[in-house]
Structures are given as C-alpha cells and as structure tokens.
Amino acid sequence: MSIEIKALDEKVVQRGKQFFQSIAGEAPSIFNKGWWTGKVMDWAMRNEDFKVQMFRFVDVLPYLNTSESLSRHIEEYFGDKDANIPDVLKWGAGKTGFGGGLVAMVLNKAIRANIEGMARQFIIGEKASEAVKGIRQLRKDGFAFVIDLLGEATVNEKESDAYQRGYLEVLDAIQGEFRKWDGLDGGGELDWGHAPKVNVAVKPSAFYSQAKAVDVDGSVDGMYRRIEPIYRKVKEMGGFLCIDMEQLKYKEITIELYKRLRSAPEHRDYPHLGIVFQCYLKSTDADVAEMLAWARREALPISIRLVKGAYWDSETVIAKQNGWDVPVYTIKAETDMAYERIAKVILENHDICHFACASHNIRTISAVQELASALCVPESRLEFQVLYGMAEPVRKGLRNVARRVRLYCPYGDLIPGMAYLVRRLLENTANESFLRQSFAEGAELERLLENPEKTAQREIAARKDVAPASTQMAGRASAIPPFANFPNVDFTIPAARAAMRQALADVRRDFGRTCPLVIGGREVKTPDTLASYNPANPAEIIGHVCQAGLKETREAIACARKAYLAWRDVEPAQRAKVLFKAADIMRRDIDALSALQVLEVGKQWDQAHADVAEAIDFLEYYGREMLRLGAPRRMGNAPGEMNQYFYQGKGVTAVIGPWNFPLAISCGMAAAAIVCGNSVVYKPSGLSSVIGFGLARTFKEAGLPDGVFNFLPGKGSVMGDALVEHPDVSVIAFTGSMEVGLHIQEKAARVQPGQIQCKKVIAEMGGKNAIIIDDDADLDEAVLGVLYSAFGFQGQKCSACSRVIVLDPIYDRFTRRLAEAASCIKIGPSEDPANYMGPVVDRAAQANVLKYAELACQEGKVLVKRTDVPQGGQGGCYAPLTIVEGITRDMRIAQEEVFGPVLAVMRAKSFDEALDIACSTRFALTGAVYSRSPRHLEKARREFRVGNLYLNKGSTGAMVERHAFGGFNMSGVGSKSGGPDYLLQFMDPRLVSENTMRRGFAPVEADDDWVA
Ligand SMILES: Cc1cc2nc3c(=O)[nH]c(=O)nc-3n(C[C@H](O)[C@H](O)[C@H](O)COP(=O)(O)OP(=O)(O)OC[C@H]3O[C@@H](n4cnc5c(N)ncnc54)[C@H](O)[C@@H]3O)c2cc1C
C-alpha cells in the first residue's frame, strides 16, 4: 500500500493538537524556572555569551578538584566581580557577596552541587545498583527502559576493557532481579506482550580504542571482540541490544558491525538486535534502503531506532574545517522531512523491520503514528523512545496515547556524564529545538505542527532572498576564486580507500626505474646512481636516482641563470598560471603521488595525502599572492610625479628540500621562487628523490619553460657546497636540520669571486617542540593530541612534539593514560592503514633514533618502550616508540632534536613553570597547550614564544594560509611559509620615480592630490 505523507497531514495536525491538549500546562523540568536548571537554561537562551561560558564551565567542572581551582575557574569564566556573576549561578548560596574565604566557599559548593544536580537529572544513577533502582521505579510508572553506560571514545585498550566490564556489571545487577519484574501492560515474561524486558544500548567506538575510518575491517574486529560477549549475555537474559550511531566517521564501521553480529551463525536466530540511523545525514535514505534490502536478502528480521542525530554541530564544523561537503542537512525542517520520509519506508517494511521512533517532537511522533495507522502496522512492530530526564510531558502524553514508551537511561560516572550533559544542554537550548520552541518559547501550535516540507520551502525562499548580495559580490570578484585549502581526504568514503589501494599497486609496477637529472629541460643520466628504498622493506627498490657531480651542478646553474634572464620579465599573471596548472596536475595525480610517499618515506595514508594536498595549496596560494604583489604600486600621490614600486625576482634559487614533507615543502619553496620570477636548481633529499623527480615532471607538464626548474639530485658531500657557494646563486631556500642550515648560512655569507649579489638564505631548521598539559586539560583530547603529535609519521616532522610538560595535579592521570595509549597503537608498514606508526625513513635515521632512545632511557625512567616492531625477513627500519619521564630541562633529551618517536615527559609545579620549561631550548618552532583556563590560554598566547602555537590541539598539521608556518631562534630564518610575507623574500623591490611634468604641464591622475 502506498501512502502519501501529505495526504495524512490534516490528521497529523489534529493528532498533534490533541497531544498538546493532553499535556496542557505542563513543562519539562529542564525548563521549569522554579528550579536551578530551568533558570540557567532560561538565562543561557537569552544570553549567548553566558551560554558559551556556562557550557564550557560545565565541561571543565569534573576536573576542578580543589577549592582553589574551582574558585579560579569561576572567576575566569564569569568575572571577578560579584556583579558580573549572574544571580542564577549564586542560587542556593544565600545572599552572599562574592570573594573572600568562607563566602566564596559557600558559593563554590552551591555551584558545584547545582551543576552536578543538573547532570544527575539526565542520568539514572552513578552506580549499577542505583541504575537498577531507578529502572525499577520507571517500570512502576509504566515505562520500559534502555540502559546505556556513559562513556565516550576510549584512548587505550585498558579503558575499552573497563568499559566492557562496566556493561557486564550492570547486566549482572539486572540479572539478579529482572525475572521478578512483571511485564508492562498485562504482565507475563515480556513487556506489552512482545518486547524483551531487558534492553541495552552500546556506543561502539568506546569498545575499541584503535578504531579508525580508514581501517574498517580492523575496527569492526576490535569492536566485535568486546561487544559480542555482551550480546551473548543479553541473549541469555532474553534481552535486546541496540548499537547506537555516533559520529559519521564510525557510520560504515557500525553498519558493518551490526551486519556481522546479526548474521553470525550463532546469533542468526535471535531477532533482538537493533541499529540506529540518523535522519540529519543526507545519506540515510540510501543507507536504510540498503539495510532493508540486506535484511530481505539474508532473511533476517532487523530493528531500527530512527533519530534525528546528536552531533549536528560537530559534523558541520568538521566538514567545514576539512573542506568537505557538509554531510548533514542545514535546514532543520529538512531533517524533519527526512525523518517522516524514512519512517514511512521502515513502516512499509514492518514485516521485516521493527521500528523504534526516538524523538521528542510532537509533530514527528504524530506523523509516525498516522503513518503506522494508515499502513496497519501491528503494535508489536512499533515503539516510542525518549531520553531520560527530558521532555517529561511528551513521555507522559506518549504513554497515554501509544502505551509503548521506552526511556533511554544513561548511567555511570559524572566525568563522561558532563560531556553527555553538554550535548543535552546544547540540544535543548538550540534555536531549532522543538522542545525549546514548544515549552520555553510557546510558539504557535500551527507552526509547531506544520508539515516540515512547508517550513523548509519557506526557509529556502528566505535564504534565496538574502542570496543576491553574495552573487553580486561574486560577480565583482576576479575570475580566480579566493584561496581555499584542498580538502583533506575523507577515508570514510569507500571509493577513497579503494583508490589508495589501487594507487599503491599501480606505483609499485613502476618501481626500479632510473630517474635522470633534468638540466635545461634535458634529461641527463650519470653513471653514479643512488637506490631509494622502501623503509618498511629495504630490499624493495623504489628507483635508482642519477647523482649530480660538480660538472652537472655548474651546468644546471648556468642553464638556470640563462632561463632566469627571460623568465623574470614574464608577466606575474602568466607565471601564476603555470602554478595553477601544476596544481591541476597534482589534483589529478593525488592518489599516485600519495602512494609513492607511503612507499618511499613510510608516511601513513592520511599523512601522505595531506602532504600532496599541502603542495597543491602552496601552488594555489603563492599563485594568488603573486597576483596581489605583481601589479606596480603607486607611492605617494603628488601631482606631476609618478612613483612606482614593484618587484623583481632575485635570480637563481637553490632549493634544498627535506625528505619528511617530500613533496609539499620542496614544491612550496620552488613554487615561491618560480612565481616570483626566479629560476630554480632543486636538490631533493636522497631519501625521497623519486618523489622529487615527480615534481620535475609536474612543472614540465604545466608548461614551465626549460631551465626554469632544474632537477639536480646529488650527494650533499659532493655537490652541496658547490651549489650554495656558486656566485650565480642568489637565493638558497633550505629546509632541514639545524646543523646543515647553519653550515649553509656560513657558506652563503662568504662572497665568492665574480659574485655580484649578497645571497639570501631562507632556512627552516629544527625544533624541540613542547606540549603543556594544564591541570584542567581535557585528557581525552590531550592524550590523543600528544600521541598524534609525537608519533604520527614516527615523530619525524619538524613540528612533532618531543617534550610534554605536565602539571603536577594531573601528572599521574595523564601519564598513565598516555602510556597505556602508546602501548596499544599498532606499529607496522605504513602501507597497511591499520598501523598507526611505521618505520623511520632509513637505516641511518634508525641508528640515530636508537641512540637517542638509549640516551632517553639513561637520563629518564622508561614509561613505554615498544620493541614489538615487525621482525621477520624484511628487516624494516623500525625504531622503538619510547616515552621516558623524570626529564629535566638541562638534560640532553630535553634539548637536542631527535627526529623520531622519542618523547620526554617533564613535570611542572605551576603553569608559569611549565611555560618556562617550554621556552628553555634554543628552538622556537611549534608548541601547544591543552587547558580550559581562559587566563592560562591568554598567558600562553603572550609568553609561549614559538613560531606556531596551538591551543587545545596538537602541535602538527599546519595548513597553508590558516596556519602559516615557521619558527625563529635556531628554528629558522625567514618568514612563514604559506603566509603573506613569504614571497617577498624571493624578490628585490624596485622603485621608479618619473617627473611627468613637461614645461609646466602635468597629466592628471585619478588619485593625484591636487589643491582642493
Ligand atoms: C531514545 C533515544 C536514543 C537516541 N540515540 C541516538 C543515537 O544513537 N545517535 C544519535 O546521534 N542520536 C541519538 N539520539 C539523540 C537524538 O538524535 C536527539 O535527541 C534528537 O536529534 C532530537 O530530536 P527531536 O526529534 O527530539 O527534536 P527536534 O527539536 O525536532 O530536532 C532537533 C534535531 O534536529 C536536527 N537539527 C538541528 N538543527 C538543524 C539544522 N540547522 N539543520 C538540520 N538539522 C538540524 C538535529 O539532529 C537536532 O538534534 C537519541 C534520542 C533518543 C530519544
């Protein structure tokens, strides 16, 4: 039977009105202004600044264990004057003034108690026994339950084990008594005559700390291992298990997990397993259709809980930050429409799919009821679910009209409870929230119950009305769109993973070839070659790279000099065009270019992709920068005089690239030089020369004239000094170690015979980057941030974290979690996306890191030393992941750059001391702070003196423009790459001043400053 929702609309509205009538005069407790929570919600909805501060304060509260830190945070979040503290916050503290001893203590106590009370409102209990007691009460009131153990993503496997134990514990507690419970509505073994009494919900990501989108199979395996025993126990009790849906990155994994559990031979005959779909995702129509088709193919009855989705803000922000299409609807009514549309599909398939309608929206609920009635869905195939602590009138109304109502009951500690509370608070105070509109704002019934299609149309029309202004702007802008970072790869998309796998196979077919030099557009072969090998398997040769000697170096510089004389006069727009073309080529080849990095230097998939994306960004950004700088600028506006300021490329530029960002950094330095009108002699690192050859090919294909970019791999010891010292080389752009950088500066400073120009050196050198962990840091984020900053790409980034400075009060908790997390990550070839860490770049790097790991163990106390790296026949260049503690600022491991997976943990008594330690090396490249203290963050801004400081994020992963990159002190000379000053270093400014007056007559220019 086919039913149109529109045709049911009148009935839906009618039903909705009756629903509202049945609960007239009632309001959910969270909006009850007679109580603290209601007052706070009211204040938050009227004052956006307070809302942000309040929710952030709620988030940090569980970490404020001393009265001193609680007082400090209250003051930092809400101001230091009594008058600034909203009265609502002081509620329960009596009529006290703020500040000073006892009075402040009373206030602190009241605030803590009120917030904890608010959190408890959404939680059925902190202990299993309390949860069971709460459930008993709910059942007495006629509600079924689904129990959920609070907990977000876990950061190590011990935490995942503990999470699993938590579930088994609450099940044990329920097992002790559930048989004594009468079934709801009619008694018997089952609720409502058909539903299991025990119902459990699980959040899959918490069951496997190593889950990641790029490794679907590994993630499913990890989750399955811990969830399956819970399912078995639930089955023993004749219960129901629902797998919740979390962030989009886990969606495919969760669906796969569900299918595996549902179709496992041992469980096929048991129908009580559910999954959740989120209607805010644009992909959900297709996902639900596919799931239903699967159920039919497999002949397996399934159960779906349909929700709108709890992560709308974060999905939107993450997509925007990564340059992805926003995966969720952006008009609320579109989500509501999707809900009704998808609910209809599920109800049409009620023979194979049980439906749990989870919403507090009376329009949504009424539509589902009308659809079910029109489609003659039996009662046993549909139930309603709401969240514990929310929407009490809705659940009561539902209980009256639909009987079958289940409450979703989180239980557990208050720390994860606060994260859950913040989500609920956000949901309830959102402008779009149905509950807010209905119960806090008293919106009109007609509007609340309106068909969402109509609402969406109105919203779309309103947005269109605003659109013309932006269209006009676009019309005025130049033909080149503004710069935008190339989107990060999204490995949640199966095609992205398949493309990478294919690319790895494809590039491998090309291995073993010889890469020539490229001088003046000619390919030049030399007898001396260097084999570049796969660090995970040194027997695998990526390519043989010809090595330049002194003769080839001189030839290359001569060709570059000749090419420069013509190229410098090419119009800036023309030069920029070549960069844009090169960017197009890299976009086309991104998978192959990334795969080559995985195999030649051992980058993980996402990091390799990010490197190519950064190269593309440099091309696009510097192209636009040259357009900005390329037009001559008039200086002053005196009539009769025309002064023009413009730039000219300096000359031949030696680009000496590193292996750690083998394409991005080389491409950035070369592209900057080229677009400024210079020619380039490019010496790649010997460890990534095959990737370097790819850059030569790209520029050639982009139409760069011969001789402007010369590819000159060679041994530093043979031709390095000759390149730097040559009198015709004007600029040296270098990225690498401090030792080599200083050597280059020394060589470049000495004027050679025949040299007519002072050489300009731009050098990005080392770092000894620190991350500070404040005593109120969010440890879930801090542990993962430090782990990624220290061990992503094996710690071989100049921005990598090599010191973590932890404040005393949080030291033990942080280091324990960090050590556990570091002990769990997978180590192996980067080609396998399941591995978190791979081999270091070559044998020499391996020997160096081993030496430093040894030193670290001598100077400090070992927390983690992972020697369980792949062994076997391949003999990869693995170095042990090493974390040591007890390190003080004067020790070598706290001062020398290692460039490998060695992390020193240092303890600080205060935030000031942490800053002092952080700034106690000669480097100043990157740094990071995890803190929720506004004052400490402000202080770090001023006093953590590094080139790039990151607050509440890791120290690596800089993006062109957004995080223009580079340091000072011994970390480098020159301005930031990917920033607005970078190109200026490659050019000489010139000024031409012309007297335009002839015999007393001067032409008039529009911007002349004539006498008024
Ligand atoms: C029993 C139960 C279980 C749940 N399980 C899960 C789960 O496993 N996974 C999960 O993610 N959530 C889950 N939720 C939470 C659920 O997603 C939210 O409670 C729900 O989205 C609120 O929807 P509503 O219909 O009650 O309210 P409404 O006020 O009608 O809808 C609010 C929702 O609309 C969407 N929205 C808000 N603004 C916009 C916008 N500008 N454009 C488009 N859409 C917008 C968001 O999804 C927001 O949550 C569960 C809820 C319940 C009751």
Image (cartoon, rainbow, N blue to C red):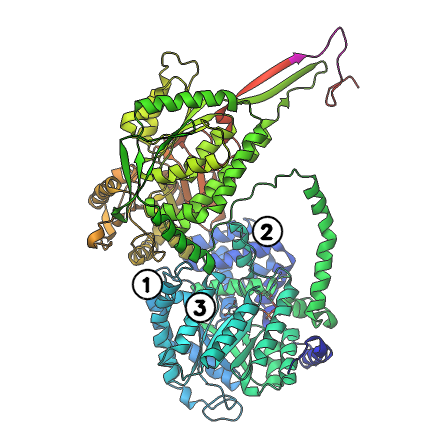
Looking at the rendered structure, the secondary structure element under dot 1 is: helix
Q: Which callout, 2 or 3, points at the residue further toward the start of the chain?
A: 2
Query: Dot 1: few (<14), some (14–19), or many (≥20) neighbours within 10 Å?
Result: many
Q: Position of residue 569 (x, y in %)?
A: 55, 22
Looking at the rendered structure, the secondary structure element under dot 2 is: helix
Mark 2 lies within 8 Å of ligand 1 (Cβ measured)? no
Residue 503 position (above or below residue 917) = below
Mark 1 lies within 8 Å of ligand 1 (Cβ measured)? no
The residue located at (63%, 84%) in the rendering is 375
Q: Position of residue 528 (x, y in %)?
A: 26, 31
Q: Which mark is residue 84?
A: 2
The residue located at (71%, 66%) in the rendering is 455
Residue 330 position (above or below residue 732) = below
**In the image, what residue type sits under mark 3?**
Thr
Magenta stretch, residue numbers:
994-1003
Q: Is residue 27 left or right of residue 268?
A: right
**In the image, what residue type sits under mark 2?**
Asn
Query: Dot 3: few (<14), some (14–19), or many (≥20) neighbours within 10 Å?
Result: many
Q: Which callout, 2 or 1, points at the residue further toward the start of the chain?
A: 2
Q: Which mark is residue 254?
A: 3
